[in-house]
Image (cartoon, helix red, strand yellow):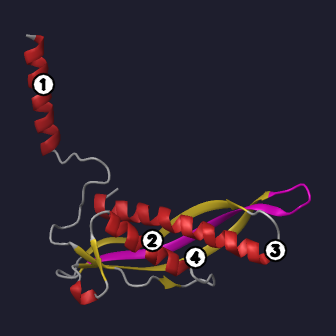
Amino acid sequence: MRRIIFTVFMVLSLIVLGSCGYHLAGTGSTLPRHIKKIYIPPIKNNTARAEVETYMTAALRDEMARRGKEVVDKREDADAELVGSIDGFRVYPVGITTSGESRRFSIFITGKFVLKDLKTDMVLFSSSSYTFRDEYEAQGTGAVNFLSLQTEAIDKIARKFARSIVSTILEGF
């Protein structure tokens, strides 16, 4: 008798969970069904830090493709367009040695992003202040090493940023 009750309970649970829209993180989408192809033009860089837009654009394209959307090279081939700009880039020392040298830095990158349905001209996602932060350790001395480590940190932030924004766009959280 307990086995029958348990089986009935499990079947009802699966029916309820399946019908309420429940899904595993990373597998759902809140976008309209017709949006299969997305155009992501180069992100605009409104900061003095060179290359930040290159890393952000590449990371967004890679993550969108990884999540099952086809990223196209021409706007006319797309169902939707994701445009963005990097508007803030700041580096702050957060760790100082006993000799007064900065060895740990925090990078903040802020941007604006809009996803638009090209068929209906409807805005599907908009964020006027998307902010990402990461820290990195400076080993050695010199400006070349500092910029090299900063570039590595930007690459890491870009990947984190892309995962975050694509999850927000596709899953609504």
Amino acid type, label 1? Phe
Residue 44: x %, y % from top left? 48, 85
Q: Secondary structure at mark 4?
A: strand
Amino acid type indicated by mark 2: Ala
Task: Give the residue pinned by disc 3.
Answer: 142
Name the kind of residue labelled 3 in the image.
Gly
Alpha carbon of mark 3 to alpha carbon of mark 2: how far? 28 Å
Question: Closer to us: mark 4 or mark 3?
Answer: 3
Residue 31 lies, in percent from the top left, at 22, 66
Q: In terms of secondary structure, where does tag 2 sit?
A: helix
Q: Residue at x 36, y 72 (%)?
A: 126
Question: Residue 59 has which mark?
Answer: 2
Q: Is residue 34 above or below residue 8?
A: below
Could you say which quadrant of the image residue 146 lies in? bottom right
Q: Mark 2, residues whose alpha carbon is within 10 Å: few (<14), some, or many (≥20)? A: many
Residue 25 in view of the camera: yes
**Percent position of residue 97, x then y:** 85, 56
